[in-house]
Amino acid sequence: MNKFNLALATGMLACTSATLSAAPILSISGEGLAAAQAAESAFFSKLKAGYLTEDFDSGYTVGAQSTTINSLAGVGSFTMDLAGSGGACDTAPYSCADGLAVLDSGSSPFSGRFDVSPENWLDSMDAQEMTISATAGYTAMGFFMTDPNDAGGRFSIGGVDFLFADIFGQALGNGKVFYLSIFDSDGLGDITIYSNNSNDGYGIDNVTVGTVPEPGTLALFGLGLLGLGMARYKRK
């Protein structure tokens, strides 16, 4: 059973527990573009009408850095909280300290990060800490993540930590891609991504925010047995 199917099965367990359904729930696709795109399609199929997607392909100056990048599609904002240093993000004309950037294949100083939409993606520029703040009023978010190499990194979602090592595995080569979906019945709060290395990062593309009907489709969202265990432990 791959990670995405495991997420579906264990997500059903979440529906039976009020404690778990109140916690943020994270689902990860299997690795690879085909599995990630299939997970995105499944995510879209369960959203109510009116969801928004930011693909970073229109209206952005490619290569321009900023501490905060606001989505032109209205999905929210992306903020560098703590800069990286010493890696390819400090290769001219870039500086890690100058913030995040929308990149394409021609402007990127990194290997392994890429777009899954026609042209661009949002790059962490090796930020050690980055926060995604979704527009208020939505309960679900999905996005592609490329090159999440930091096995010691973590997500912090609604006060619950999800370790990269548990989600992606202990060691990942360059160029991996996954689709992540997050559900919180209380509404999406800030999602903070921590990297354990100051000279490594990731790319994000096609960020979607929407609303999921409850309770039937809650079964589509879940990290897997280990992830649910973490959420349960921290909510006791």
Image: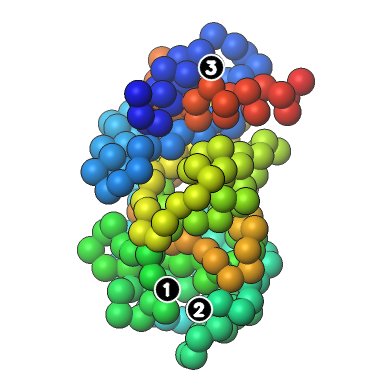
Quarter of image, res 163 = top right
- Name the disc covering residue 14, or none: 3
Q: Residue furthest top?
A: 16
Whole-percent x, y for residue 175 in the image? 36, 59
**Quadrant of the image for the N terminus?**
top left
Instruction: Kindly identify the amino acid type of the residue bearing the numbered disc 2.
Output: Ala
Quarter of image, res 55 = bottom left
Q: Residue furthest right?
A: 236
In the image, residue 160 sits, relative to residue 226, either above or below, namely: below
In the image, residue 122 sits, relative to residue 64, either above or below, namely: above
Q: Is residue 199 left or right of residue 138?
A: right
Q: Is residue 191 left or right of residue 43?
A: right
Mark 1: few, some, or many residues within 10 Å (few <14, many ≥20)? many
Callouts 2 and 1 close, C-beta under 8 Å: yes
- Name the disc covering residue 110, or none: 1
Which of the pair 167/104 is nearer the observer?
167
Q: Secondary structure at mark 2?
A: helix
> What residue is disc 2 on?
88
> Residue visible at 64% across and 44% down?
156
Which of the pair 110/24 is nearer the observer?
110
Instruction: Kindly identify the amino acid type of the residue bearing the numbered disc 1.
Output: Phe
